[in-house]
Amino acid sequence: MLLLEDVRKSYPQPGATPLAILDVPRLEVMAGEQVVIRGRSGCGKTTLLNAIGGLTAVDSGSVQVRGRDLTKLAEAARDRFRARHIGYVFQTFNLLAGFTALENVLLGMTFTGQSADPERARSLLDRVGLSHREHHRPMAMSVGEQQRTAVARALANKPVLLLADEPTANVDPAHQQQIIDLLRGACRDEGVAMLLVTHSNEVAAQFDRVEQLEEINRVVAGAPTAAV
Ligand SMILES: Nc1ncnc2c1ncn2[C@@H]1O[C@H](COP(=O)(O)OP(=O)(O)OP(=O)(O)O)[C@@H](O)[C@H]1O
Ligand SMILES: [Mg+2]
């Protein structure tokens, strides 16, 4: 379902050689599989998810989702493919400030060119415990509520692949488990594969497959020298 081969990604640096972040020979995720990605801060987890989601162009290699190589698609086609097939819970949520929780979920649906399904949007908000906040805009929601809205939005289109970048980093333990249960349950019910980044041992322990990014990535990111 997801297959990465020889994916390299570096960031340009003014006046210096590019900063290599990823060199991943292979990463495969089966349909419906749930995988945790771990690794220390700055090792490239968000960069990896962005490469898989087609938000970041890779330097070389292929990123195949359902047999389609995203690196070969033009930007507009890649955006359409992502909207239709990939759900993304961003580390920083990326909710639209001018829209309520319900509108944010509904908007995610319209990006695919299909009509929005208010009933599904409401039931997803209900599953993340936000029925009573559906008309709140992000500024009028707690950080954890914004995170839960982002989870509902990512599931809105019944994607084949869900990318979740630390989706429980900003919520209390009760809601942390609720979000994990929601993500896992919804992905299981709808046959969605999931790649989830987490720093939490408690969360990672619930998954059968845990990949340490440093082990699948050949780039050894320069560890910062401790200041003395
Ligand atoms: N646009 C960019 N330009 C240059 N360097 C970048 C850019 N984005 C990220 N980096 C660098 O790439 C490295 C990997 O960043 P990334 O966000 O993928 O890390 P991460 O593993 O998700 O970390 P965290 O656990 O803190 O979220 C970092 O060292 C970061 O400084
Ligand atoms: Mg990150």
Image (tube, rainbow, N blue to C red):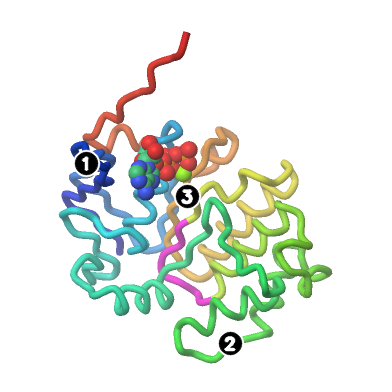
Q: In this rendered view, identify the residue nearer to me: 73 or 63.
A: 73
Q: Is mark 2 within 8 Å of ligand 2?
A: no
Q: Residue 51 at what x, y percent from top left?
A: 32, 56
Q: CA distance from mark 2 to mark 1?
A: 42 Å
Circle 2: element type: loop
Magenta region, residue range: 157-163
Left or right: residue 180 compared with residue 175: left
Above or below 19: residue 33: below
Name the residue beneath numbered marker 1.
Answer: 18
Q: Is mark 1 within 8 Å of ligand 1?
A: no
Question: Is residue 37 visible in this depiction of the protein?
Answer: no
The earlier-in-sequence mark between 2 and 1 is: 1
Q: CA distance from mark 3 to mark 1?
A: 27 Å
Q: Is mark 3 within 8 Å of ligand 2?
A: no
Measuring 38% from the left and 17% from the top, which residue is drawn there? 225
Task: Name the image quarter holding residue 121.
Answer: bottom right
The earlier-in-sequence mark between 3 and 2 is: 2
**Farthest residue, direction front:** 15
Give the residue type that dot 3 points to: Leu
Front disc: 3 or 2? 2
Give the residue type that dot 1 points to: Pro
Q: Any magenta on residue 74?
A: no
Name the residue beneath numbered marker 2.
Answer: 116
Name the residue beneath numbered marker 3.
Answer: 196
Q: Residue 150 at what x, y percent from top left?
A: 60, 63
Mark 1 Cα shell of 10 Å, populated few (<14), some (14-19), many (≥20): few
Give the residue type that dot 2 points to: Ala
**Farthest residue, direction bottom:** 115
Q: Residue 96 at what x, y percent from top left?
A: 61, 69
Circle 3: element type: strand
Question: In which quadrant of this rendering is ligand 1 seen?
Answer: top left
